[in-house]
Structures are given as C-alpha cells and as structure tokens.
Image (tube, rainbow, N blue to C red):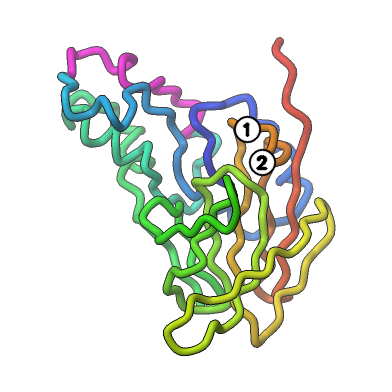
Amino acid sequence: MTDIHGATAQLRAVFDQIQTQAVDQVVCLGDIFECRIGKREVAGYEYGGRLTDVFDPDPELAGLLDGARLVRGNQEERIRALVPDPDLPAWTRPLLDAPLERRTDFALYCHGHPLPWRELEPGLWCPADADFPGRALVHGHHHRSALYRLWPGGTGRPVRVERLPVRFGEPVPLAADGRYVVNVGSVTGCDADRGPSPAWAVVDEAAATVTYHHTPQPTAP
C-alpha cells in the first residue's frame, strides 16, 4: 500500500480488507502524511512552532501501521526538512525516518519519487528505465493501479514497455524471464482517471503473482 496522505479512514478501510487476505507482511511505500507546505514553498518557509501548520500528526496512522515494513516518501522527506527534530513527537520518527527502499530476491519496494520517470503517453508515467534487481519494481507516488512488462530495447535503445490489463481481484502471473513495474495504486486518490481508491496490491513472491484490490471509499460518520 502507498500514498495515504493522512487519510486515516481510508487506511482503516484497507486494513479491514487486508485482515481477510492472510498476508504475511504489510509494506507501506510512503507518503503516509500530507505535507501542507508545497515543494515550491519550501525554500521560503520558516517554521513557526505549530506542527499542524506543516502536517496533521494523527497518531492513529502510526497505530494502524504498527508492525508494517515502512518506506519513506517525498512527503516524509519534506516534513523532516521543515520541522526541527525536537518538535516532532517520538511516534512520528519511525514513519518519517523509514529507509528509502526495501529489497527481496524477488522485488525492489520503494515509493518511487527518485526514480527516472518516462511519460509513455500524456499523463501516463512509468519508471521504465529504472535499474532494479529481481523480477519486479513495486512502487507508488503516481497514484495509479498499473502494471507494465519491460522488454529489452536493444543496444542504446530504451526498453520497450507493455502495459498489462489490471483486473481487480484477479492474480496476474509474473513470468520467470520477465521484468515488471508494479504501481500499486493509492490509499487516497487525487484523480479519478487513475483508477479507484482506496487501492492496494498483494504481491505473492512464492507464486510470482500480483493481485490488485480496491474497496469503496468509507462514508463520513
């Protein structure tokens, strides 16, 4: 899962579904919080002593993610740069200071903001030229449930990218001789054109499959 952006209710709805899926490990790929200071405003920003001016420090997010493997996103990096360390509650630090990536023999898991992105068509971006070990690059950042297979492009040529269909709830096999980019979708969506949200993906490394899921937006109390 990835790109929560402070949406505690949506994250809770995802966990309600994950508990029925018998997963071995939850991996959160960053942007847990939403920084209220835009990246273009950072250079001139002076922290005034109010944490809530920078982000909403909701401790329930940390509680829900307790036990998950965390990866930091660009929102966490921005918050860390803006707020002095003594002003940060202790419970925020594991979320803000998570590693940039996690690796297994099967996949590289990361948020995706430092990757080399290629615009395949207007508005459709993919880190197709990233160098990663294993069979899959599993990422967030782009808020889209999307799956790509990468094919060798020949000497000096970019790799050829094949977009594979995403059918929610149906496992997609990842061929042993293939390389894949897995965009898992977002817990909170910012663009309806990028697919439903809350969304997440189950990566079964033993079976070499990825299954996309989504659940209806929780209703306000």
Q: Is residue 150 left or right of residue 212?
A: left
Q: Residue at x 77, y 56 (%)?
A: 166
Q: Is residue 57 magenta?
A: yes
Highlighted magenta segment, given as a residue range:
47-62
Left or right for 65, reference 163: left
Label 1 element class: loop
For the residues bearing labels 2 and 1, Cβ distance under 8 angstroms: yes
Asked if the stretch drawn in magenta spans residue 172, the answer is: no
- In this view of the protein, can residue 11 be seen by the observer? no
Residue 142 x %, y %: 53, 46
- Picture residue at 34% right of the left edge, 15% below the top: 52
Examine the image and state in which quarter residue 34 appears: top left
Q: Which residue is mark 2?
A: 194
Image height of 48 relative to 62, above or below: above
Residue 22, given in percent of the width and then of the height, sits at 74, 55
Q: Which of the numbered marks, if any, corresponds to residue 191? A: 1
Quarter-of-image position of residue 13: top right
Nearer to us in this view, 62 or 199: 199
The C terminus appears in which quarter of the rendering?
top right
| Mark 2 element type | helix
